[in-house]
Image (cartoon, grey):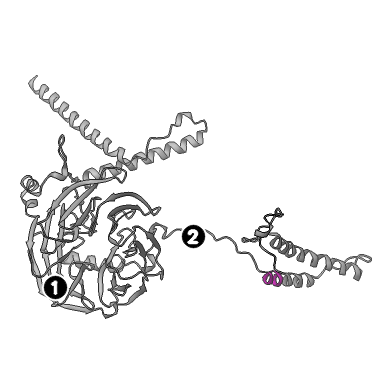
Amino acid sequence: MVANQEIMDKDRLVTAVEQEMSDELNLKTRKYLRGDGANLETLRDKKLKGQLAVREKLYGQSAKAAAKAEKWLMPTEEGYLEPEGLEKTWMVKQESIIREVDVISSRKPFDMILPELGPYNLEYASSGRYMLVGGRKGHLAMMDMMSMDLIKEFQVRETVRDVVFLHNEQFFAVAQKKYPYIYNRHGTEIHCLEEHGAPLKLQFLDKHFLLASVNKFAQLHYQDVSTGVIVANYRTGLGRTDIMRVNPYNAVIGLGHAGGKVTMWKPTSVKPLVTMLCHHGPVTAVAFHSGGQLMATAGMDRKIKLWDLRKFGVLNTYSGHAQTMDFSQKGLLAIGNGSRVQVWRDSGNQEYEKYMSHAMVKGYQVGKVSFRPYEDVLGIGHSMGISSILIPGSGEPNFDTWVANPYETTKQRREKEVHALLDKLQPETIMLEPSKIGTVRPPRRKERSTKKEIEEEMETAVEAAKSITFKKKTKGRNKPSKRAAKKEEEVFKAKRLFLEQQQMNNDRPLKKQRIVEAELPKALQRFSRKKAS
């Protein structure tokens, strides 16, 4: 009896666990379903009813497969700060967070005080493992953020305006006083890109192997770093700017200008794809969401705006000022201004509200904020060095080793580099809507033929009609007069089609047709246009 009781208890426990897992899976499945299913009972058409039933079954299977993949292949979930009662998340200090997190996470926040060579700029590699630091007075350094080891540090004895990693951590580009330079991880100068001039900002398009720069003469350059060819060189025509960001969704470059405009560029277009008037004053910061359909801008008019890039309309406008902005992988927005950094979170329907706040030491001026990929960390470059703070929920918790692997070996890195070069996209593939690539272009409306073309076609048809040979018929029906009449009839038929087309073109009203003026009263006739004599 005791053994049977134990077996029954085990069965109940297994059933309870299975029920709990099933409920969890159903909850995840609802997230991937396309709304409520169609009500098939009201349909009378049996064929349509069967087709819809098969379609609904496929939708359910795909949603269940996506939920299982999320459960087993993406086991880690992001964790945000959860307030209790009247508590506010933006009032929580970094010291309180560090006391509660694990030992490894508690080592990630730090303050590196370098007062003599600032202000500092920073950039993270796509895997989030390496950090590149550039001081305004020529100090360059690369760090391994996992082991907190310094890989290389050197002084270029020249003004450094910006730093950016290339396709991997082995190479990086630096915007120096006169030209951009490319260095390897050992600090050896590889190239001097004299064609770019004096750069103010750099961006790298990793899928296309293109290094983009904007110089002090407002010239936008694109250079292919795999071949060394200058792909494009355009004048923006809107004055000097150092506000440049790349949209990660479609690789379109966004520039912010002093007139309050934001322009979007691709290397195969002389003119900007889009010109948006975003602010009534100079644009101070631009940031793009990783989804590619949300843009944040800040201006000197003390406004921060969120834009929907699908319809190029403003979603929300907030009061505030920002010198630098950045979106995280999970959609958090970091805003740096003066000695304060704020992080906003989407509360639903693109309504952003304050999530966290961090105050630097009084007098520090924030120059750059950047989220570290795959980590809940925000890097801050300021006038007195660099800092790092914890932002729970900012990073993607599950990384894909085929996309970005923080633990990749030398062999894996080499193979990845070769595959990236083989899969390199051409500059022509950069467009506002990349999903259109591979689709069929809609047919153009047929253009109206000119009068000369109609006359030439008609002459060809008449000549063909005249050259027709008729069968010889019986006596009395093969007279020359009858044969001539038949030829005239064929010529008239050939002409008639073209004459009708010409008549239709003549009868069709022009796009810009003057409105016939009606008879005006005598008192108003002096205001009407006088006819040319």
Which is more toward the observer, 255 or 323?
Answer: 323
Asked if the magenta segment contains residue 452, the reply would be: yes
**Picture quadrant of residue 60:** top left
* Identity, as a three-letter code, of the amino acid under mark 2: Arg
Up-down: is 69 above or below 252?
A: above
Asked if the magenta segment contains residue 397, the reply would be: no
Which is more toward the observer, 78 or 316?
Answer: 316
Please, what is the dominant secondary structure of the magenta stretch? helix
Residue 148 shows in the view: no
Mark 1: which secondary structure? Answer: loop
Quadrant for the N terminus in the image? top left
Up-down: is 396 above or below 246?
A: above
Quadrant for the C terminus in the image? bottom right
Q: Between label 1 and label 2, give the one nearer the viewer.
A: 1
Q: Which residues are magenta?
A: 451-457
Q: Which residue is mark 2?
A: 441
Residue 264 at x, y = what percent?
36, 63
Q: Which residue is mark 1?
A: 137
Mark 2: which secondary structure? Answer: loop
Residue appearing at x 36%, y 73% in the figure: 235
